[in-house]
Structures are given as C-alpha cells and as structure tokens.
Amino acid sequence: MPLARFGVSLEKDLLEALDEFVIENNMPNRSQAIRHLVEKNLVEKKWNCNQIVAGAVVILYDHHKGDVTTKSNDIQHEYFDVILSTMHFHLSHDSCLEIVAVKGQANRLTELSDKLIGIKGIIHGKLVMSRAE
C-alpha cells in the first residue's frame, strides 16, 4: 500500500509523550508510532462494535493442577466455529503454554477468552485481537 505524507502539529507535551512512546516501544520513528496508535484505535473500535476480528488467546498453566486441559478442551469445543488452530507448548515439566488462534465476532472471542482465562489453574491469560480485513 502506498504511503501518504502529511504534517502534524502537536502541543509540546504531547510530542514529548509521543517520543517517549517511540522509545518505550522500540519503534524506529514517530510515523511508526502514529501508525500503531491509529491501527490500535481502529481495532478497538471494531472490537467495541462487535465486528469480525482475528487474534489469539494465550494461556499459561501448570498442567498438574486440576483438570485445566480437560476444561480447556471442553470450552474450545463449544467455540469450534471461531477457533482456527491451537498450539500447545511444554515450557517445563509442569508449565504449558497454549495459543488459540481465533477469528470471529469480537464479543464471541472475548467470551471464549474469558472462559479460558477463568479456568482454575490458569497462571496467566490474555486475548490479543486485530483487524481481520
């Protein structure tokens, strides 16, 4: 996609905040930061409007605690229509990382991730979504 150039005027404190954002996120320049922030805003708008989005649910758990795997599988079967793929990694003898690739209506993906992350024994979980189109 071709780039379009334009000028932006910002208050000094807002420009300083943008420069800090560039540094904190290891971005090459202000343009990349602005692209990232605009894209993030568009994704969140689609998310809030319950449009079709794609993303991943990432969960970390101890597979020796409870029946996390069974509960996770049961939940995933309820949401087969929005799950594209699941990857399972053994991080150590006890710890597992699971990444569930998803695409569907934002509210349904949020519902799925809330159920997965809410399973007793999940150490950490997060849903990441992006525009699907």
Image: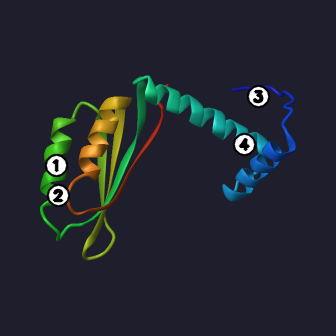
Determine the secondary structure under disc 3. loop
Determine the secondary structure under disc 4. helix
Specify whether 94 is left or right of 44: left
Sort mark 4 into few (<14), some (14-19) or many (20+) by Cα contacts within 10 Å.
Answer: few
| Residue type pointed to by label 2 | Thr
Q: CB atoms at circles 4 and 3 under 8 Å apart? A: no
Viewer-nearest residue: 17 or 32? 17
Disc number placed over residue 73 in the picture, else none: 1
Q: CB atoms at circles 4 and 1 under 8 Å apart? A: no
**Residue shown at the point (79%, 43%) measured from the top left:** 14
| Quarter holding residue 90 | bottom left
Task: Return the x and y of residue 71 as percentages of the image width and height.
Answer: 14, 52
| Quarter holding residue 15 | top right
Choose the circle earlier in sequence order: 4 or 3. Answer: 3
Task: Return the x and y of residue 8 as percentages of the image width and height.
Answer: 84, 31
Q: Which residue is mark 4?
A: 32
Task: Return the x and y of residue 20 as percentages of the image width and height.
Answer: 75, 54
Q: Which residue is mark 2?
A: 69
Q: CA distance from mark 4 to mark 1?
A: 39 Å
